[in-house]
Image: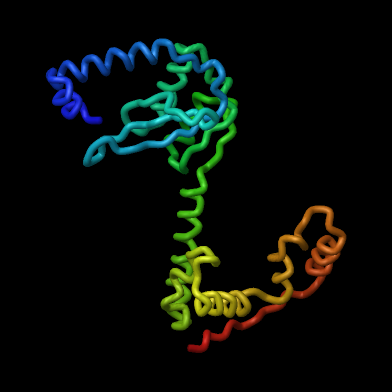
Amino acid sequence: MPFAAAARLTGVSWHRVRAICARYVDMALHQDDLSGLRHVAIDETSRARGQNYVTAVADTERRRLVFLAEGRKSGAVGEFADHLKQHRGHPDSISRATIDMSAAFIKGVAEHLPNAELTHDKFHVLALASNAVDKTRRLEQRLDASLKGLRWTLLKNRDSLTAAQRTDLDELVAQAVSKRTAPRLVVSRATPGNPQAQADQRRDEDAPPVVHEREPLQG
C-alpha cells in the first residue's frame, strides 16, 4: 500500500507514515541474520522512469530479498559483501550467484564473492540464442526467400506451433542438417558411454565431409 493511502486511512501525515515504516525496516534489518546465506540472485531494476536503477540481491533458497543498493555497477556487489559482514554472514560463504550477463555484475562477483560459482539466468541466455537465430534467418533469407515469415516458427516452443508451422520447421531442419550430423541430434544416441554413439563418432571422424545443398521450401 502506498504511503499516501496509508496516511489517508490512519489520519496522519504522509511524512509520519514514511518515518514509522523506515524505523521498522531499520529494526528488521538490524536483526537480520545472514549467516546461513549460500545462494544468491543479483539483478537490477528501475525504481522510477529514466535511468534510476537499484541492484537487488535475493536469497534463492528462502526466496526473499536481502539487500538493495543504488545503481547497477560492480561496486553494488561490494556493498552487499560489506552488508553480509555486518549481519553475521561472510562473502566467502556464498557458493552460487545467479546473474544476467552484465559485465559489471560478473566483475563484482569475481572481486567480492570469490567462492561463488556463476550461473546465468535462462531468460538472458534464451534471449541471446533467440536473437542469434533470428539474425541468422534474416541474413539467410537474402538468398532464400522461403525463410521469410518463419521468424516465430523458429523462435516459438514446438508445442506452441500449429500443424503447418511444425511441418515447415521439420522441412527446414531436414534440409539444413546432413545425414552425417543428424544422429548427433538424438539425445539417446549422445548418452556418455553409449557404445553405439562412440562407434558413430569414430566413423564420422574418419569419413570425408558431406555437403548437402539446401533447396528452398515449397509454398
Colour scheme: rainbow
Q: How many marks?
A: 0
- Residue at 50% over, 24% down: 112
Measuring from the top left, give residue 117's x and y in whole percent: 59, 33
**In this rendering, is residue 24 above or below 122?**
above
At horizontal 42% and vertical 78% (from top left) the residue drawn is: 148
Residue 159: percent from left, percent from top: 54, 66
Quarter of the image for residue 199 reads bottom right
Depth check: give the residue in front, 202 or 30. Answer: 30
Residue 59, horizontal then vertical, whole percent = 49, 28
At 51% from the left and 88% from the top, the residue drawn is 218
Quadrant of the rendered structure where residue 49 is?
A: top left
Where residue 101 sits: x, y (%)?
47, 43
Residue toward you, 60 or 214: 60
Going by the image, does 144 lie left or right of 8?
Answer: right
Can you tell which quarter of the image residue 50 is in? top left
**What residue is drawn where x is 42% and y is 36%?**
43
